[in-house]
Image (cartoon, rainbow, N blue to C red):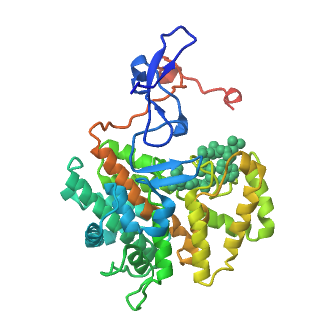
């Protein structure tokens, strides 16, 4: 097949440069610029708006048409027909498991769900009012000091064992972050409970009670985990890949991803959405907040709206909105005031020229917080749950990168805008800058 190419031409008389154009299975072509450095040229793309950092076969996002596939399966079908353990398997191995494979995978994860008893002491070093994400970053990073038996990342079996440990222990750590913050004893995973069910059990059970999560909450939590599991090369996944490219151990890489996800522009948005809806407080006040979101210079943004890739409705938001209706109805919370404000805010924004022109639609975070509130999850735990789900994607993407024999350490370059060469000035010859000129 004739190779497609792009040709760079220069006005300053430099020789044109031919660059290969590569096509994937789906989505935009890419211009392969790897040889540009040989011409002492870099591309310039802060924020990576037009940059493909890698090739990957895990997740496909079509931002224009609002489509999301995990290993080729549409998110809508997985959210309705699959469960999170199956999605973890799919992301990691590339295929849906047969019944025996799923059963074995599920048993394996459960066998790794406990933490080394000494890990408990890591929690005690945090203030009780520490944000749970700060505890997650600390405790997950510390896991690398406990599992020296499987840190040869060149060994596929070691990578798989680390994947099992991370997928299995994150729910326990996440639930214990919550328990620690409210001063309740840690609860241990129970045999016979499913993945999402065990997480809710560890969140809300107490040694003196007989709590078991209700099926509506379990299904809603499982669906939230599926919807948040992976999303191609987002900020936190790119962080995990960059950390992993140096050969850092997988627990440290996931801790780096946690830190990146915590930001309000990324995984912290679901927490910010609920705080925004609470601040709006009443449908009658929506107009003034939409006006602020449109005002240049006003830092207020409609949290849960907009996306770097989706210039159409985030398909996860559609499923999450439907889940909101189902969960709130099932739990008798259909009059939830925040949900009413969210629905009204969405319809106002979707008819507003500013949001239409800038293609700003609700994203996955817009409704997820309302469902989590209905499940009695505290706002401070929303990003923790996003992180719990995204660990499936991070682990799969990390494994894909480390398995690539062409792997290189990630090392971007820059456009240097600092001072040109100058000689050192000894201290005695330096004068204080004139304040009237330095401002
Ligand atoms: C996630 O990347 C992923 O895949 C992420 C994620 C995943 O699954 O991993 O999908 C999860 O992070 C979802 C996004 C959650 N964040 C929020 O909801 C925070 C609010 N949204 C934004 O701050 C913003 O939309 C981003 C960060 C999500 C995207 O920012 P971009 O692509 O860098 O776009 P931008 O900030 O340059 O905005 C483009 C224009 C700007 O106006 P102009 O300067 O061109 O006049 O749109 C405006 C922005 O001011 N704009 C908004 C807005 N988002 C963008 N205006 C009001 N409200 C908003 N929410």
Answer left or right for 111 relative to 328.
Answer: left
Q: Is residue 134 visible?
A: no
Q: Residue at x 42, y 64 (%)?
A: 388
Q: Position of residue 91 (x, y in %)?
A: 37, 56
In the figure, 256 relative to 81: above or below? above
Q: Residue at x 42, y 86 (%)?
A: 212
Answer left or right for 323 relative to 125.
Answer: right
Residue 198 found in image quarter: bottom left
Q: Position of residue 399 (x, y in %)?
A: 31, 50
Q: Residue at x 56, y 10 (%)?
A: 12
Answer left or right for 68 relative to 136.
Answer: right
Q: Is residue 28 visible?
A: yes
* Residue situated furthest front in the rendering: 1
Foreground of the two, 262 or 218: 218
* Residue situated furthest top in the rendering: 13
Answer left or right for 297 relative to 416.
Answer: right
């Amino acid at each position: 097949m004739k190779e497609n190419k792009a040709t760079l031409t220069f006005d300053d008389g430099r020789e044109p440069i031919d660059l290969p154009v590569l096509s994937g299975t789906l989505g935009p072509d890419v211009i392969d610029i790897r040889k540009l450095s040989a011409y002492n040229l870099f591309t310039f793309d802060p924020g990576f708006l037009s940059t493909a950092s890698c090739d990957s076969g895990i997740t496909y996002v079509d931002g224009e048409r609002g489509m999301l596939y995990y290993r080729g399966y549409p998110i809508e079908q997985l959210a309705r027909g699959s469960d999170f353990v199956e999605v973890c398997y799919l992301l990691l191995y590339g295929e849906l498991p047969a019944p025996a494979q799923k059963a074995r995978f599920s048993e394996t994860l459960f066998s790794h769900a406990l933490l080394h008893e000494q890990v408990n002491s890591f929690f005690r070093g945090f203030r009780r009012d520490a944000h749970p994400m700060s505890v997650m970053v600390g405790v997950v990073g510390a896991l690398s000091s406990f599992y020296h038996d499987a840190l040869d990342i060149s060994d596929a079996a070691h990578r798989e064992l680390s994947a099992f440990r991370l997928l299995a222990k994150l729910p326990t750590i996440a639930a214990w972050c919550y328990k620690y913050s409210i001063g309740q004893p840690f609860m241990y995973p129970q045999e016979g409970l499913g993945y999402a069910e065990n997480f809710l059990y560890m969140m809300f059970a107490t040694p003196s009670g007989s709590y078991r999560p209700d099926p509506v909450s379990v299904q809603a939590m499982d669906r939230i985990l599926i919807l948040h599991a992976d999303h191609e090369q987002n900020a936190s996944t790119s962080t995990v890949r960059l950390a992993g490219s140096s050969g850092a151990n997988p627990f440290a890489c996931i801790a780096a991803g946690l830190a990146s996800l915590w930001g309000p522009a990324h995984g912290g948005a679901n927490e910010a959405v609920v705080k925004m809806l609470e601040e709006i407080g009443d449908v009658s006040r929506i107009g003034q907040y939409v006006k602020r979101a449109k005002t240049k210079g006003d830092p207020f943004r409609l949290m849960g709206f907009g996306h770097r890739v989706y210039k159409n409705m985030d398909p996860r938001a559609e499923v999450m909105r439907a889940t909101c209706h189902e969960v709130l109805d099932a739990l008798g919370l259909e009059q939830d005031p925040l949900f009413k404000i969210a629905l009204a805010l969405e319809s106002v924004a979707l008819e507003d020229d500013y949001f239409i022109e800038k293609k700003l639609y609700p994203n996955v975070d817009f409704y997820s917080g309302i469902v989590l509130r209905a499940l009695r999850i505290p706002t401070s735990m929303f990003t923790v749950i996003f992180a719990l789900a995204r660990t499936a994607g991070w682990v799969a993407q990390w494994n894909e990168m480390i398995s690539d024999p062409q792997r290189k350490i990630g090392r971007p370059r820059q456009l240097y805008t600092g001072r040109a060469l100058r000689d050192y000035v000894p201290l005695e010859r330096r004068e204080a800058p004139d304040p009237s000129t330095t401002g």
